Image (tube, coloured by chain):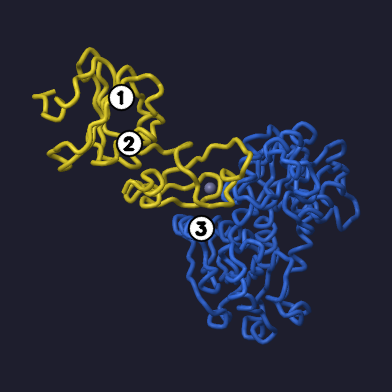
Chain colours: A blue, B yellow
Amino acid sequence: MGGLQAGSVGAFKGRDVISILDFTRSDLEELFEAADWFRRRLLDGNVPKLLDGRLVALAFFEPSTRTRLSFEAAAKRLGGETIGFTSEEAISVAKGESFADTIRMLDAYADIIVVRHKYEGAALYAAEVAEKPVVNAGDGRQHHPTQAMIDLYTVKLLFGSPDGLVYAVLGDLRYSRAAISFLYGLTLYKPKRVYLVSPPQLRIREEVEMVLRERGLPYREASDITEVIEEVDVLYVVRIQRERFPDPMEYEKVRGSYRVTPELVKKGKPTLRILHPLPKVDEIDPRVDSMPQAAYFFQASLGVPLRMALLTMILGVYAG
Amino acid sequence: MGPVPDSELLVRKIREGTVIDHIPAGRALAVLRILGITGREGFRVAVVMNVESRKLGRKDIVKVEGRLLKPHEVDVIALIAPTATINIVKDYKVVEKRRVKIPRLVEGVLKCKNPTCITRKKGEYIRSRFRLVSEKPVILQCVYCGTLLHEDEILAQVLGEQE
Ligand SMILES: [Zn+2]
């Protein structure tokens, strides 16, 4: 592999993955090269059993389908095995065991721990408690680093590079960890411009704004996507995170406040591409799904090879 | 160290210990609370409140006899008493004098304001931890959840209903 690779071999080995901000652009380049390799192996139906004899713990304290299955598929395709649980009710946490003790148990059993939790900071805390590497599969409204990796990889495959493009991130920017992690990820690159488009109640939180400013992301806030759509290369859409609203009345005020329709998409460039971390609810008109601009199913298909790359690199078994 | 000001005469000089001077008036008890000094430790503690100060108009002073507070223990009071000076006394003499400085990491003293922060989860033995992101005005950031604590929120939290 290339020269970059030689300098950063082992950048992932044994490492915790808590926030996309912990990574550099060259780390991600290395990861994307490995993801390319696994994508080819998957297409060939020739995936080496690099995780043979390895056990991946999937600690999903918050329900998840997509992310959990994608980690599970990645591990199993590579010949690895998984243990875990899919919600807090299913395990002894419901009987009052502390989060830290559950993590200690998994640390004793498995080679790597993938954690999702509704509390912000849970993954960092797990990494402090565990000896084994911890991968954050979403902590509350804060981070979702593997989603950001998939999203940036998608943009790279679609446009050649995330640099120089105009982005619009549309939707619940207050509570969506996917949107926030994508924005954090963009700070590692050189986008031309980033529009943040959300209802006023759902604009980015102050600490997110602080990071974007400090890192010099060229962003502007906008309240209406139709005003900027003509300029946009990548439209990143997220659903309203109903489950994170402290007050259901607040959710009622903003539900249905934005929607991507074929008419909107047609106003954009023909090369416009639409990303969405999925699942989507009603923020994208289903008629958009079959338009060439809809890239979210392609994006979702990259979850497994990207996570294969990540797991093997952290466990030090990927040789390219 | 110059002539003894009147305020010093309110409480006798200590032989060995720490004198925290130039505390904004009314905050001496909060300073003790932050330092975790309850009076039950057995040290002699003197609190002088609302004495005249050239610099501050009015100030508070705390004297802790028999305990030499180290910078990392005492710097955290800078959150509510940025003007405070620390005097280390040995044999009735000030052997070391310095100003407090907000530490880069504030551990255990404050509570994160985000109710879904892991540090607020019941049943976990986890200390709060904040990194200093700005000194003027003071802004701290929770290491775990990223939430910012602003100066007024820090003061309100530490001082409670006192102000
Ligand atoms: Zn917090």
A234 and A190: which one is in front? A234
Query: Residue at 41% of width from left, 47% of height from top?
Result: B157
Instruction: Kindly state the secondary structure of the residue where label 2 is placed.
Output: helix
Query: Residue at 39% of width from left, 37% of height from top?
Result: B103
Residue A7 in sight here: no
Q: Chain of mark 3?
A: A
Residue A99 location (% of width, % of height):
68, 40
Instruction: Kindly state the secondary structure of the residue where label 3 is placed.
Output: helix
Q: Residue furthest right?
A: A45
**Which numbered circle lies on residue A208?**
3
| Res A126 quadrant in image | top right
Please tell me how crowded label 3 is: few (under 14), some (14-19), or many (20+) other residues with Cα within 10 Å: many
Beta carbon of the mark 3 residue lies under 8 A of ligand 1: no
Residue B50 location (% of width, % of height):
20, 38
Write down the residue under mark 2.
Answer: B29
**CA gap, disc 2 and disc 1:** 11 Å
Query: Residue at 56% of width from left, 57% of height from top?
Result: A184
Please tell me how crowded label 2 is: few (under 14), some (14-19), or many (20+) other residues with Cα within 10 Å: some
- Give the mark nearest the N terminus, 2 or 1: 2
Q: Amino acid at mark 2?
A: Leu
**Which numbered circle lies on residue B45?**
1
Q: Is residue A225 above or below residue A127?
A: below
Residue A17 in sight here: yes
Q: How many marks?
A: 3
**CA gap, disc 1 and disc 3:** 44 Å
Foreground mark, 1 or 3, reads 1
Query: Residue at 56% of width from left, 78% of height from top?
Result: A231
Q: Is residue B59 left or right of residue A276?
A: left
